Image (cartoon, rainbow, N blue to C red):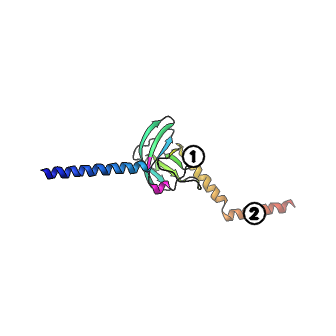
Amino acid sequence: MKKIWLVLLAVAVLGGAGFGLWQLYQRNNSVTVVFADAGGVTPGTGVWMAGIKVGRVLGLQVAGDGVEIRLFLGKEVRQQLTETALFVIDPGPAQGGRPVLRVKAGAGGTPPLAANSRLRGVNSFALWQLDDYSQKVLEFMNEPQLQEGIKRLEQFGNELRK
């Protein structure tokens, strides 16, 4: 009977230590993003970057400037994000109506996010899509064939003015 109690005690101690280490790991790999409202996000909601799930929501709380959403993002993901990273709540029609958080890395040349960073998020998914479209337009404008066509049109216009 004593052996059973010793085994149970050992399991409880190891379980408690493991749980404590896991909590510490999550706390050191979390980022807080402040949104105007939670938009249906709950603990466990996924965080997606470039179509890949890279984290999850740990918790939410009301703050003076909105709703703080604490995210678990591994160190390797945080190192790809900067202070200008864009976090947005996607209402989730493609996910069966359940909202998800989406993130874009942000501008290069700035240091990666530190553990326990606090950033502002955007509730408007339309803004996210506008950012996507503007990037696509810029990429299109820099296509070599388009640039060559523009140069030819300029030359043609100069010829006509002569």
Q: Residues within 10 Å of mark 2 (few under 14, many from 20)?
A: few
Q: Residues within 10 Å of mark 1 (few under 14, many from 20)?
A: few
Give the residue at mark 1: 127
Residue lying farthest right? 162
The percent position of residue 51, horizontal first and vertical second, equals 48, 56
Q: Secondary structure at mark 1?
A: helix
Residue at 47% x, 52% y is 48
Q: Can the viewer see residue 43? A: yes
**Magenta-drawn segment:** 71-79
Residue at 70% x, 62% y is 147
**Circle number at residue 151:** 2
Q: Amino acid at mark 1?
A: Leu
The percent position of residue 115, horizontal first and vertical second, equals 47, 50
Q: Nearer the viewer, residue 77 or 136?
A: 77
Left or right, residue 142 beside residue 83: right
Residue lying farthest left? 1
Q: Amino acid at mark 2?
A: Lys
**Circle number at residue 84:** none
